[in-house]
């Protein structure tokens, strides 16, 4: 009987023996792959520890040459190209380290399986048992299995330790982009120049200001409605179609730390969004990597001040972060409903803060700041008897450069920036007047356009400039056209007006010589800016709060449900695409080459072809 059992055991070993050599070969191959991956990761890690990509000698030399020849556009283009190549190489090393962990894990798994199979398949010498005794143990096999187990455990421990170790070193400090004109100077932040200790707000995450890895994406949407706050982008290759629920052309989707109706802004691949808790006790500002949606840094700080009385409570529809941030390419500025204005650099270090008095209006400080040169323009209009003010602050310090006291009341429009005969103009639309200023805060012209005492009139839609005309509109009042080059009292310069299908929140959009105007109820009107000749009206099924944008020869219109209708900019209505996002939207999208950034109710979406 015993002899028969031993014979069966031998037969089983014979059947497994054919798997022994393949299992050993597989283990060797997996080991070689794991070692190669480990070697590559170690080399990349050493390079990241010792090489500063933003101080590459060749790049620094070219920058110095450019500083001496600031008008050489060819040289500037070469500097940008080399700068991008250096950054791409730097982040390729990061990617190899990250992906190498998965390769190493797979190699470990393959080795474990292969060794287990080899241990089971390798035959061992069979010794006949003594008569009348049980089969003896197989010490040779047990010894081999014990040794293999020790080696396997050791390998797993080493691999696990390697994968768990924080290999990615601290990234080098952020580097501001090369200026587009003028003298070039060192743009590296001074690590000793920190004003965090003087912050009025106690930043929740100020243990260490993280440095910023610079994404490969380029393009700028620096404030509400982009360059000059007009909703017009020079971007190319902007996606035409997407489907959020199906994941089509969704490059990434990131859940935001705090909610808000404010819009995203973009500067050379960095995306900034503000937010606030529902009760307004916590305010926040976040910086995301536009390439993959990862949160680079997120600052939270407490709200300062309390409403003086019940009449100054913040309307829940607006919340505490309705104003969209703005950036000058060095600092990012965020204004909150309570009057706090903060400035952070791109590495997440607070540079300055300014606090305006608690607002006396139902939607609080909801007008987004805009950047004009080295000035941050902030519009604050309030209910009487509290005065309205247009501020110009120094972007670098927050100091007041000038202020223009106003007799206007309630408005939440965003100042529009334009030029007339080469001179900068700041257009403000309020109640009861439209006032246009020069770059130093002097009134160029002014026109009363809505009733001062009509409570239902709440200007929030920003204007448009097309074919030499300023076009402004607000619900429960009218839409008017005034030559942008007017002077003084422009009351007699109103060339036309209409009073139907007026916008409540959506800003007007200039499309060539024409204007698009979207009512809150979804009626789109297209008419000429000069004579107000109507080309068409179109009724959409949804309501609208997000302002339309013009990019890549197409108009993008996103309704409250997150459905984006893409239409032709011509004088006849032509729908090009209808794209569901799968999430409600109040914010206006940001546009750069090849990408749309859309803020939903809880997520920030990047629309574009995925690199994955």
Image (cartoon, rainbow, N blue to C red):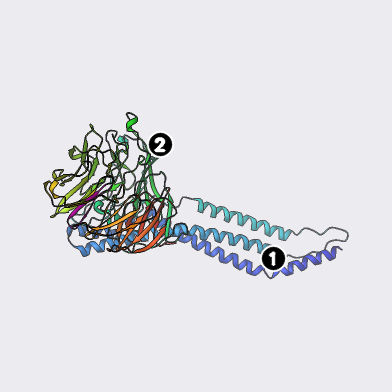
The residues colored magenta run 460-474
Residue 410 among those drawn in magenta:
no
Residue 33, image x, y percentages: 52, 64
Q: Which residue is situated farthest in the bottom direction here?
A: 18
- What residue is shown at x 35% (from left), y 33% (from top)? 313
Observer-side mark, 2 or 1, equals: 2
Residue 410, image x, y percentages: 26, 39
Residue 269 picture quarter:
bottom left
Residue 469 among those drawn in magenta:
yes
- What residue is shown at x 16% (from left), y 45% (from top)? 447
Residue 233, image x, y percentages: 28, 58
Residue where numbered disc 2 is placed: 279
Residue 574, image x, y percentages: 33, 64
Decide: few, some or many residues near mark 2? Use Cα within 10 Å; few <14, some 14-19, many ≥20: few
Of 608 and 434, nearer the camera is 434
Of 431 and 549, nearer the camera is 431
Say whether disc 2 or disc 1 marks the residue closer to the N-terminus: 1
Instruction: Measure how far apart labels 2 and 1 are at the Cα level.
Output: 66 Å
Vertical position of residue 81 compared to residue 228: above or below: below
Of 609 and 201, nearer the camera is 609
Of 352 and 459, nearer the camera is 459
Residue 293 tag number: none
Vertical position of residue 285 compared to residue 610: above or below: above
Residue where numbered disc 1 is placed: 121
Q: Is residue 220 left or right of residue 40?
A: left
Decide: few, some or many residues near mark 1? Use Cα within 10 Å; few <14, some 14-19, many ≥20: many
Q: Which residue is situated farthest in the right direction here?
A: 132
- Tell me if residue 503 can be seen: yes
CB within 8 Å, label 2 to label 1: no
Q: Is residue 105 left or right of residue 399?
A: right
């Amino acid at each position: 009987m015993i002899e028969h059992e031993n014979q069966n055991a031998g037969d089983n070993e014979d059947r497994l023996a054919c798997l022994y050599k393949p299992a050993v070969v597989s283990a060797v191959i997996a080991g070689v792959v794991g070692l190669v991956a480990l070697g590559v990761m170690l080399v990349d890690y050493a390079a990241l520890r010792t090489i500063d990509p933003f101080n590459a000698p060749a790049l620094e030399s070219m920058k110095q040459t450019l500083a001496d020849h600031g008008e050489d556009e060819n040289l500037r283009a070469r500097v940008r190209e080399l700068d991008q190549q250096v950054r791409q190489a730097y982040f390729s090393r990061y990617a190899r380290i990250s992906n190498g962990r998965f390769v190493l894990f797979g190699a470990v798994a393959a080795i474990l399986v292969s060794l287990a199979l080899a241990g089971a398949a390798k035959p061992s010498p069979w010794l006949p048992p003594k008569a009348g005794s049980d089969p003896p143990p197989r010490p040779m096999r047990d010894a081999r299995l014990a040794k293999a187990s020790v080696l396997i455990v050791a390998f797993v421990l080493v691999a696990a330790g390697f994968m768990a170790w924080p290999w990615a070193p601290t990234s080098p400090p952020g580097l501001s982009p090369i200026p587009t004109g003028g003298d070039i100077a060192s743009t590296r932040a001074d690590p000793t120049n920190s004003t965090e200790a003087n912050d009025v707000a106690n930043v929740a995450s100020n243990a260490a200001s993280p440095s910023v890895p610079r994404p490969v994406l380029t393009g700028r949407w620096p404030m509400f409605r982009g360059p000059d706050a007009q909703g017009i982008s020079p971007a190319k290759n902007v996606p035409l179609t997407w489907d959020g629920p199906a994941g089509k052309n969704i490059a990434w989707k990131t859940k935001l730390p705090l909610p808000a109706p404010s819009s995203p802004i973009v500067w050379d691949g960095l995306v900034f969004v503000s937010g606030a808790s529902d009760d307004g006790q916590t305010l926040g500002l976040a910086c995301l990597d536009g390439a993959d949606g990862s949160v680079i840094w997120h600052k939270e700080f407490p709200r300062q001040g309390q409403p003086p009385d019940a009449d100054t409570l913040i309307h829940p529809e607006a919340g505490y972060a309705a104003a969209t941030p703005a950036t000058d390419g060095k600092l990012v500025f965020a204004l909150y409903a309570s009057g706090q204005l903060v400035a952070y650099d791109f590495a997440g270090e607070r540079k300055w803060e300014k606090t305006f008095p608690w607002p006396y209006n139902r939607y609080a400080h909801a007008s987004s700041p805009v950047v004009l040169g080295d000035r941050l323009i902030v519009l604050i209009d309030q209910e009487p008897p509290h005065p309205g003010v247009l501020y110009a602050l120094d972007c670098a310090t927050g100091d007041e450069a000038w202020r223009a006291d106003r007799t206007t009341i309630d408005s939440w429009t965003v100042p529009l920036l334009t030029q007339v005969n080469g001179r900068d103009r700041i257009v403000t639309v309020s109640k009861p007047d439209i006032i246009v200023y020069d770059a130093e805060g002097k009134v160029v012209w002014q026109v009363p356009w809505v009733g001062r005492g009509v409570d239902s009139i709440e200007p929030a839609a920003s204007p448009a400039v097309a074919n030499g005309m300023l076009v402004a509109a607000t619900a429960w009042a009218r839409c008017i056209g005034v030559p942008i080059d007017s002077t003084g009292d422009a009351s007699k310069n109103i060339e036309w007006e209409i009073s139907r299908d007026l916008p409540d929140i959506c800003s007007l959009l200039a499309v060539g010589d024409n204007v698009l105007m979207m009512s809150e109820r979804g009626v789109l009107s297209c008419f000429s800016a000069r004579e107000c000749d109507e080309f068409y009206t179109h009724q959409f099924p949804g309501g609208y709060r997000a302002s339309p944008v013009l990019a890549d020869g197409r108009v993008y219109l996103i309704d409250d449900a997150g459905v984006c209708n893409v239409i032709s900019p011509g004088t006849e209505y032509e729908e090009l695409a209808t794209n569901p996002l799968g999430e409600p939207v109040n914010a206006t999208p940001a546009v750069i080459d090849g990408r749309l950034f859309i803020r939903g109710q809880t997520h920030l979406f990047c629309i574009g072809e995925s690199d994955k």
